């Protein structure tokens, strides 16, 4: 290739570049329609702003019964009868191992024996199996086992009644629950 042959393509590239730049500048020089459109948009009215909401004034109320009993707390008569009446947990009794766990975390896994000598196998959350008899205690609400059958165990729990006293609540655990 000679020098003349290599100069010709470079010259054509320069000419094409200059021509493209001139065309781009020519297109930018006529922006009257753009200016008109911007002016028209600026002249348009915007959407109306909604008015501020009216602030309601509240009527003040003067409470004058401060010396009366609070209707949401039990009276002294209710507290006295609530504390003395009804069942109570035996606080002097030695706690049994299954009383350390919530009743819903215990699982009945089987039974042993027949008739009155039936025992229930209960699995605690640590996967330890315990033998439970009628009269034993389990659960954190002083649950007392009242009946045992082949497929479930029945308990009576003592739960606070909200007035300082206690009330009984029935509960059961069925074989294979959970």
Image: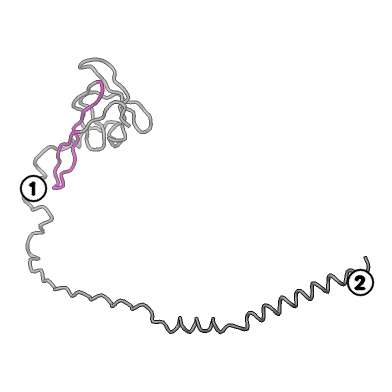
Classify residue 114 as left or right of residue 79: right
> Which residue extends farthest right?
2
Residue 102: percent from the left, percent from the top?
Answer: 29, 37
State the SS at label 1.
helix
Q: Quadrant of residue 172?
A: top left
Name the residue carrying label 1: 80
> Which residue extends farthest top?
114
Classify residue 19 as left or right of residue 173: right
Q: Residues within 10 Å of mark 1 (few under 14, many from 20)?
A: some
Identified at 67% across, 77% down, the residue is 24
Residue 107: percent from the left, percent from the top?
Answer: 31, 30
Q: Quadrant of residue 174?
A: top left
Relative to 73, does residue 129 appear above or below in the rendering? Answer: above
Relative to 176, does residue 46 appear above or below in the rendering? Answer: below
- Counting every numbered tag in the picture gives 2
Disc 2 or 1, which lies upstream in sequence?
A: 2
Residue 2: percent from the left, percent from the top?
Answer: 94, 68
Name the residue carrying label 2: 4
Q: Which residues are magenta?
A: 150-170
> Which of the pair 156/149 is nearer the observer?
149
State the SS at label 2.
helix
Residue 95: percent from the left, percent from the top?
Answer: 26, 33
Q: Is residue 157 magenta?
A: yes
Relative to 29, does residue 61 appear above or below in the rendering? Answer: above
């Amino acid at each position: 290739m000679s020098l003349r042959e290599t100069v010709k393509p470079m010259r054509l590239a320069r000419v094409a570049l200059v021509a493209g730049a001139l065309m781009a500048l020519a297109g930018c020089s006529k922006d009257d329609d753009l200016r008109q459109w911007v002016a028209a948009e600026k002249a348009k009215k915007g959407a109306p702003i909604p008015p501020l909401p009216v602030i309601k004034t509240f009527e003040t109320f003067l409470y004058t019964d401060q010396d009366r009993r609070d209707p949401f707390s039990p009276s002294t008569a209710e507290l006295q009868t609530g504390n003395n009446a009804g069942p109570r947990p035996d606080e002097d009794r030695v706690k049994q191992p299954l009383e350390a766990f919530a009743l819903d975390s215990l699982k009945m896994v089987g039974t042993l024996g027949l008739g009155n000598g039936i025992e229930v196998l209960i699995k605690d959350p640590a996967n330890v199996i315990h033998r439970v008899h009628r009269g034993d205690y389990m659960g954190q609400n002083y649950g007392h086992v009242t009946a045992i059958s082949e497929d479930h165990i029945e308990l009576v729990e003592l739960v606070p009644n909200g007035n300082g006293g206690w009330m009984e609540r029935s509960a059961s655990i069925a074989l294979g629950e959970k």
